[in-house]
Amino acid sequence: MKRFRLKADGRIVELRDGKEFPLAPEMGPGAAAPPGVRDLRRRAQLTQIEFASRLGVPVETIRNWEQGKRAPRGPARALLAVIAHSPETVFAALSTEPEPA
């Protein structure tokens, strides 16, 4: 099972053997932009409604992101970055029920 950590500055790192490894290279000038929400959704072969349901957000949020009316921020942006890297892992983790404490 892979383990990830969201850093305070918005970076996502993978934890392996007690060390942190950046999930994606730093975005510098001239770097390619990460895939858009529509591209991620289409690669996952999901409708807007299905994608919204899996992420636990209103479908209007997905529509606004895809149409450029709003941009994902904070945890949503981090989650989308992880989906771009490992969609199966994210969707499997989101579909499981938390264990009672």
Image (spheres, helix red, strand yellow):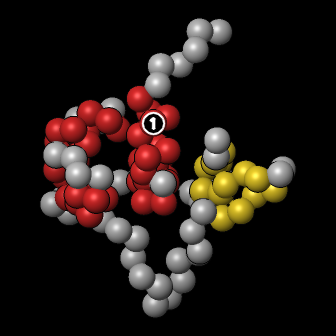
Q: Amino acid at mark 1?
A: Ala
* Residue in front for this viewpoint, 35 or 93: 93
Quadrant (top left, top right, bottom left, bottom right) of the C terminus: top right
* Residue in front for this viewpoint, 4 or 46: 46
Q: Seen from this angle, which residue lies furthest top?
A: 100
Locate residue 34, reporting x and y percent. Answer: 40, 70
Question: Residue at image x 32%, y 36%?
Answer: 54
User: Is residue 49 left or right of 88 when viewed as pictured?
Assistant: left
Identify whether 93 is placed above or below 70: above
Q: Seen from this angle, which residue lies furthest right?
A: 18
Locate residue 10, reporting x and y percent. Answer: 57, 57
Question: Residue at image x 75%, y 58%?
Answer: 20
Question: Residue at image x 42%, y 82%?
Answer: 32
User: Is residue 101 left or right of 39 when viewed as pictured?
Assistant: right
**Dot 1 corresponds to which residue?**
92
Identify whether 34 is placed above or below 94: below
Locate residue 87, reporting x and y percent. Answer: 42, 51
Question: Residue at image x 54%, y 83%?
Answer: 28
User: Dot 1 lies on which element?
Assistant: helix
User: Is residue 29 left or right of 58 when viewed as pictured?
Assistant: right
Q: How many marks are shown on the rendered structure?
A: 1
- For residue 66, which quarter of the picture? bottom left
User: Is residue 55 left or right of 78 when viewed as pictured?
Assistant: left
Quadrant (top left, top right, bottom left, bottom right) of the N terminus: top right
* Residue in front for this viewpoint, 78 or 92: 92
